[in-house]
Image (cartoon, helix red, strand yellow):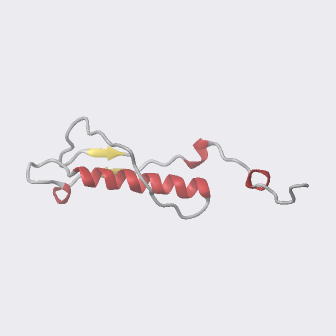
Amino acid sequence: MTDQATSTEDTIPGKPTHASRTTLSHIMSGNDTNLLGTVHGGVIMKLVDDAAGAVAGRHSGGPAVTASMDEMVFLEPVRVGDLVHS
């Protein structure tokens, strides 16, 4: 028996990771803060998800969605006026 199906690896060339590299930068504003005056963790998570979606879309050549995320650890607070890169 022979395998007549062509695998995806045979038809689609691979891409180096640098071809999909993307940086998103955002200046935090008062609209992004909680009652403590620091930026909501959810705002930071959204920025990371936006950047990841852009990278995945560039890499795959089509739309991409986040199916899951294992963990995000916040090391220090982000404040109004801070420039965040993801």
Name the image quarter holding residue 33.
bottom left
Q: Residue furthest front?
A: 1
Tell me which residue sits at (60%, 56%) in the image: 60
Return the residue nearer the eye: 53 or 79.
53
Q: Position of residue 84 (x, y in %)?
A: 31, 45
Q: Position of residue 54 (x, y in %)?
A: 49, 56
Name the image quarter holding residue 82.
top left
Tell me which residue sits at (87%, 59%) in the image: 4
Q: Position of residue 34 (x, y in %)?
A: 13, 54
Q: Position of residue 80 (x, y in %)?
A: 18, 49
Q: Residue furthest top?
A: 75
Return the residue nearer the eye: 21 or 56.
56
Name the image quarter holding residue 74.
top left
* Quarter of the image that includes the N terminus: bottom right
In the image, taking residue 65 as reference, residue 44 lies left or right, namely left
Tell me which residue sits at (58%, 42%) in the image: 18
